[in-house]
Image (cartoon, rainbow, N blue to C red):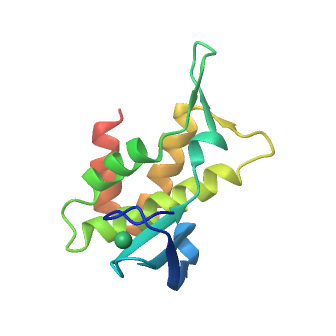
Amino acid sequence: MVCIYCSGSTKVTNSRPQKRLHQVWRRRQCTQCQAIFTTNEAVDFSTSLVVRRPDGSMTPFSRDTLFVSVYRAVGHRERSVEDASALTATITAKLLHGGSEAAVSPADITQTAYETLNHFDAAAAVQYQAYHH
Ligand SMILES: [Zn+2]
C-alpha cells in the first residue's frame, strides 16, 4: 500500500488482529514523508457469501446493508457503533458457518440477525423485527 499523501512506499509499524471482527488493524508509516496512517484489512464477504433471492437470482452478500439494519436496531445503546460492528461480525460468521453451501436466503439473514440480537438485547431484537416484517 502506498502513502496517502505522497504515494511513497509504506511499512507496517504495528498491527493488531481483531479476532471477533475478522479484521486486522495496521499502523503504517511512509518511508519517504514519514506520515503515519492506519488501515483495516477485512474479509470481502461479497466474494465468499451470496444471497439467493426468492426468484432464484443471486446477489453478493452486503456487510454494509446488514450493518445498517443492525445499527438501526441498537441505536438506543450508548456504544451503538461498536455493538453494531461486533454483532454484524457475529451474524456474518453464523451465516458463513451455517452450511457448506455459501448461499443464504434473505430469510436466513433476517432470522440469524434476529436471534443474535435477541440473545444480546431483547429491545434491539424488537426494533429489528419492526423493520423486517
Ligand atoms: Zn508519504
Residue at the (31%, 51%) spot, across then down: 126
Please, is residue 130 above or below residue 113 in the view? above
Location of residue 111 in the rendering, given as x and y in whole percent from the top left corner: 51, 44
Location of residue 88 in the rendering, given as x and y in whole percent from the top left corner: 45, 57
Say left or right for 49 vs 86.
Answer: right
Please, is residue 89 above or below residue 127 in the view? below
**Which residue is farthest top?**
55
Q: Nearer the viewer, residue 23 or 30?
A: 30
**Which residue is farthest bottom?**
14
Quarter assignment of residue 81:
bottom left
Q: Nearer the viewer, residue 107 or 102?
A: 102
Q: For the C terminus, give its image quadrant.
A: top left
**Which residue is farthest right?**
100
Q: Nearer the viewer, residue 110 or 46?
A: 46
Count of labels in the image: 0
Residue at the (64%, 15%) spot, across then down: 56
Location of residue 7 in the rendering, given as x and y in whole percent from the top left corner: 40, 61
**Which residue is farthest front?**
32
Location of residue 82 in the rendering, given as x and y in whole percent from the top left corner: 33, 70
Please, is residue 35 above or below residue 40 in the view? below
Quadrant observed for ligand 1 in the rendered image: bottom left
Quarter assignment of residue 22:
bottom right
Quarter assignment of residue 5:
bottom left
Please, is residue 3 above or below residue 51 in the view? below
Say left or right for 97 vs 55.
Answer: right
Residue at the (81%, 45%) spot, across then down: 100
